[in-house]
Image: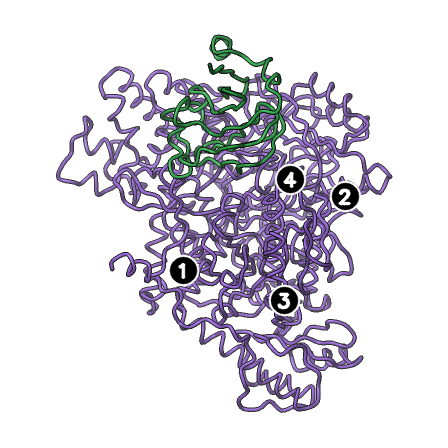
Amino acid sequence: MATTYFTEDHEWIRVEGGVATVGITDYAQEQLGDLVFVELPEVGRKVAKGDVAVVVESVKAASDVYAPADGEIVEANTALSSNPALVNSAPAGEGWLWKMKLSDDSQLSGLMDEAGYKAMIG
Amino acid sequence: MTDNRAEFAGRHIGPGPADTRAMLAALGLPSVETLISQTVPKSIRLDRPLHLPGPATEAEALAELSEKMGRNHVLKSFIGQGYHGCRVPPVIQRNLFENPAWYTAYTPYQAEISQGRLELLFNFQTLVAELTGLPVASASLLDEATAVAEAVGIAFRHHREKRSRVVLAGELHPQIVDVVKTRAEPLGIEVNGGEIDADTAAVIVPWPDTFGVFRDHSAVIAKAKAADALVIAVADPLALTLLEAPGKRGADIAVGAMQRFGVPMGYGGPHAAYLAVSDRLTRLIPGRLIGQSIDTKGRPGYRLALQTREQHIRRDKATSNICTAQALLANMAAAFAIWHGPQGLQILARRVHALAARFSAGLAAAGFAIAGKEIFDTVTVTVEGRARRIAAEAELTGRLIRVIDEDRVGISFDQTSVEEDLLALSGLFGATPPSEAELMLPERRRGENFMTQPVFHEIRSETEMMRYLRRLADKDLALDRTMIPLGSCTMKLNAAAEMMPVSWPEVANMHPFAPAEHAEGYRAMTDELEGWLAEITGFDAVSLQPNAGSQGEYAGLLAIRRYHQSRGEAHRNICLIPSSAHGTNPASAHMAGMDVVVVRCTDEGDIDTADLKAKVEQHSQNLAALMITYPSTHGVFEEGVKDICALVHEHGGQVYLDGANLNALVGLARLGDIGGDVCHMNLHKTFCIPHGGGGPGVGPIGVKSHLAAFLPGHVEAGTEHAVSAAPYGSASILPITWMYIRMMGGTGLKQATELAILSANYIAERLKAHYPVLFKGRNGRVAHECILDTRVLKENAGIGVEDVAKRLIDYGFHAPTMSWPVAGTLMVEPTESEPKREIDRFCEAMISIAKEADRVTKGEWPAGDNPLVNAPHTAAETLAADWTHPYTRLEAAYPGGDPDSSAKYWPPVSRIDNVAGDRNLVCSCPPVSEYLGAAE
C-alpha cells in the first residue's frame, strides 16, 4: 500500500516498499506554466534531504525540486527529456520526476497528507 | 518665457516651456520646484548647484573634444595581444554603426519588434558555431578576458562547484590571466599551470598563445578528457577560418574576441567576445542567447531563448551576473562576415598569415630566435636586452610593436598591414623578408566547406548590403521611430553630436596598450570625465573600467571585499539585499564571494526597516555590505535612506548604492552624500550612451576615498584586479558621456532630472483612472518612472500584461518594462527626452487599450478572439482575403482610428511562441549540407 506525502515546496512523494517516487503538484505546474525543460538527476547519485535533485523550467521560471529525504536516485523519468509537457498534463502520473531508495523513511514523517496540503494551498 | 532652444539642453529635453506648464497644470502644481519638493525628501536634497563647467553648444563641445583627442598620437599598431587593426567596411560603418535605427534600439525582450537585430545576432551565432565547430553560440559577451572568466564559470557550475582548479595549458594574454584570477579568487577557484587532477574543473588551451604560437595540446586534451575536466579553447576567430575547428579537436567551450571582424580597437572597446559550447553545456551559458521559434501563424521568428538561466529569474543561482551582450558590435562582426563571406575571410586570413610567415622567415635567416614553429599572425622574437630600443626604433617609423620583456618583442600583422610595413619592420632587425615563405599554420586545417548558409553567400554588392541592413532595421522599433518607455532602462536621446566623436580616427583606431604618452587626449578626456562623475554622484574616486552595469556592481562589491580583507576582517561576507532588488545584485554578490541575505520589503515597496534592523544586528559580526537601489526599483524615493546607511555603517558594513535610477537624482541629490560608500552609474542609461540593441553598456563606479585603493587595476599599469580586458573598458564610447555633460552643464543636467520626474508623474496622473499606479511616495508622487497595474484587466477581461504589451505594438509603441519589479504590471519611464506630444500619444494608447479590454469585459468581443489577445497584427493577416475576427481590420491595425498615423508600425511577425522556442532550441542556422542530407 503506497503512502503519499506532500511538502510545502509543492512536491508529492509516493512511497512504496522503501522507494519514493517524487513529482510536483498540479498547483505547482499551474503556477510555473508550460514546462520547457526538466534537468533530470543521474541514476546512482546519492542525495541528502534538501539537496536540489531536479530543476524544472518554464519560460518564466526555473524552480529547484528538492530531495525530500536522504537516499539514492534509482530512476529518472527520461520521458520528460523529449516531452516535459507531461509534467503539465499529468503531474501526479506520467509526469513524475524521479524515484529514490530512501535511507530512512522516518524523515518523511513530518510531511503533510493530501488533506493538509489542500488546506495549505487554500 | 519663450521656447528658446538655442542651447543643447533645450534640444535634449523634449517638453518645452509651454509643455512643462501644461504638465504642471495637469498635476495641479505651480512649479517644477513644488513637484520636486514633494518628491525628493528634503533630507537628501543637494543645496547647491553642481560644480561643472557651464553648458557648451554642440559646436563648442565638439571643437573642445576634438582639440583634446587631437593630442592622441595614433601610430599603426602591431602590438596584437588581443587587439588588431581592421577595416570597418564603409557600408557597415554608415548603415549600421552610425545608424540610430541600430544603435538606439533596446535589448530585444519584445521579440516581435526586434526581428531585425535578432536575425543579425542569430547570424552572429551561426558564424561562431561554424568557426568553432561547437553547436551552441551565444549572442556575445563583453570582452575576451571576461569571456574566458565566464567559460571558467561554466566549468565550475558544470561540476556543481565541487572542483576548484583551473589549469592553464599555455600562456594567455596577461590581461586575460588577471581578469580570470580576479574572478576566480572569491569563488575559491585556483588558476595555475600545474597537472590535471580529479579536482580540475577545466583546462584552458590558448589557440594561439600570447606569443602567437600554436602548441601541440593533444596530450593535455586527452588528459582533460580522462579526468572529466572541460577543455576551454581561447581561439582567434580569423585564424579559425583556416584551421580545424576547436570543437573537432576536443574543446567543450571556445571563446575569443571578435574585434578584428570589422570593429575598431577603440582604445580597448567596446567589441564583442564570442562564446560557444557543446550541447550538454547549453543551460550553463551566461548572457544572451537568441533562439528561433515560430509565431502564431507558424512563421519562423527569433527571440531571446532560455531566459530562466539569467539573473532576473535565478538571482544568486543565475549562470552569471551578466545582463547584456555587445549586440551592436556582434552585429557589426556578423555583417563583416556576411560582407566578406567565408572565402573572403580566408583570403584576409591568408594575407595576414603570409606577412607573418615571410617576416618570420626573414628574421630566422638573419639569425634571430623565433618563438614556435606554428603561428598565424604574430611573431615573437628574442632580441637579448634590446626590446625597448627596437620598439623605440619602430615608433620612429610610425609603428608600435609589443615589448614582452627586456629580451622579447612581439609583432602582430593584421588586415591593415601592407608590404611596406613588412619591409620596414624587417629592416629594424636588419632582415630582408623572402618574397614567399612556407606556411607556418598548424597541420590540421579546414577546407572551404564552412559558413555554407546562404546568408554568407548571397550578399556581395554594396547595393545588396545597404538594403539588407535597411530591411533588418525596418523590422525593428528603436528610438528613431518611437518612444521606448522601458522602466529602469532610461531610454533617453542619444544625440548626434554625442555620437560623432566615436568614429573619429584618433578615438577609434588606438590600441589600448599604446604607450601612455600617445594617449594624452584620451587621458585628458577620462580625467575630466572621472572628475565630473565624482562631482555628480558625490564620490571621491571613479573607475571607468567596468564595461557594463553588472561589471560595475561586481567591481564595487570586490572593492568592499578587499577593503574588509585589508582590515583583517575577511570574514565579513554577508551581503544584505532587499527582495525588491534587481536580480543582478544577488548574482553579483555571489560572484564577489558573498552570501546573500534577503531583506523584506513592505507592501508599499519600501525596505522593511524592522526586518533590516534585525538582520543587520543578527549578522553584525559578518556584515560586509548592504546593496540597495536608490530611488528604489519601485520608483520611489524612500524617506529613511540616510538612517539605513548609518545603521549599516554602525555595524561595520559598507553601503553599495545601485545607480540604476540615477536619472532621478542628477543635480538634485548625490548617492555619496546619502551615505553610499560605492555606487555604479550606468552611462548607457543616465549619460546617453545608446543601448545598441542590447549592448554595449558602461558601468563606472564611484567610491569614497577609503575604497579608492581597491578600484580595479590593470596589468599594463603594473597593477591587478582588473574586471575588464582593457584599462578603460569601453573607452571609445566614453566621449558620448563627456559630450553630454559638457553640453548640458550643471543646470541642464538638473533640469533634465526635473523633467524626467515631471513626465513620469504626468503619465501617472493621466493614467491613474484606468490603471492603478503602484508605489507612490509620501506625497503621492512617483520618481522618474511609474508602475501601472494591468492586473485589473486580467481580473475583468482575462487580458494579461503580455496582451497589453503586444497590443501597444499595433499602436506603434515599444512596450514598457513588463512584469518587473511586480508581476502583471508595466513600469513606464518616459525620460526627459520625450516630447509631451509623444507622451500624450502613449497615454492615449494606454487609455484606448483599457477601453478595448472593457469591451471584452462587456462581452462585445469574446475573451479568446479580440484585438488584444491576437496582437500584434501583421499586414499579411490584416490584408488577407479572409477576415473572421469580430472586430474590423481598421480596429486591428489602426486602433487610434486614424489611418494616416505616421507612427504606424507593421510587425513582421505575429506573437512569437515562447514555449515552442524553449522546448525545441534552435540557436544557429544549420549548414546547407544538413538540408541536402534531409532531402536525400
Identity of the residue furthest to the left in this view: B881
Q: Which chain is green?
A: A
What shade has chain B been given?
A: purple
User: Do discs 1 and 2 belong to a common subunit?
Assistant: yes
In the rendering, which numbered label is found on residue B540?
Answer: 2
Q: Amino acid at mark 3?
A: His
Question: Do residues under tags 4 and 2 come within 8 Å of each other at their CB atoms?
Answer: no
* Cα–Cα span, label 3 and label 1: 25 Å
Report the residue marked by disc 1. B95
* Cα–Cα span, label 3 and label 4: 30 Å
Tell me if B554 is positioned left or right of B496 in this view: right
Question: Do residues under tags 2 and 3 come within 8 Å of each other at their CB atoms?
Answer: no
Label 3: how many residues lie within 10 Å, few (<14), some (14-19) or many (20+)? many
Q: Position of residue B789 (x, y in %)?
A: 45, 22
* Cα–Cα span, label 4 and label 2: 23 Å
User: Do discs 4 and 1 belong to a common subunit?
Assistant: yes
Q: Amino acid at mark 1?
A: Asn
In the rendering, which numbered label is found on residue B511?
Answer: 3
Q: Secondary structure at mark 4?
A: helix
Q: Amino acid at mark 4?
A: Ser
Dot 3 or dot 4: first in sequence order is 3
Residue B890 position by quadrant: top left
Report the residue marked by disc 4. B588
Q: Is residue B846 above or below residue B385?
A: above
Q: Nearer the viewer, mark 3 or mark 1?
A: 3
* Number of marks in the rendered image: 4
Question: Do residues under tags 3 and 1 come within 8 Å of each other at their CB atoms?
Answer: no
Label 1: how many residues lie within 10 Å, few (<14), some (14-19) or many (20+)? some
Question: Do residues under tags 1 and 2 come within 8 Å of each other at their CB atoms?
Answer: no
Q: Secondary structure at mark 2?
A: loop
Tell which subunit mark 3 falls on: B
Q: Position of residue B632 (x, y in %)?
A: 60, 28
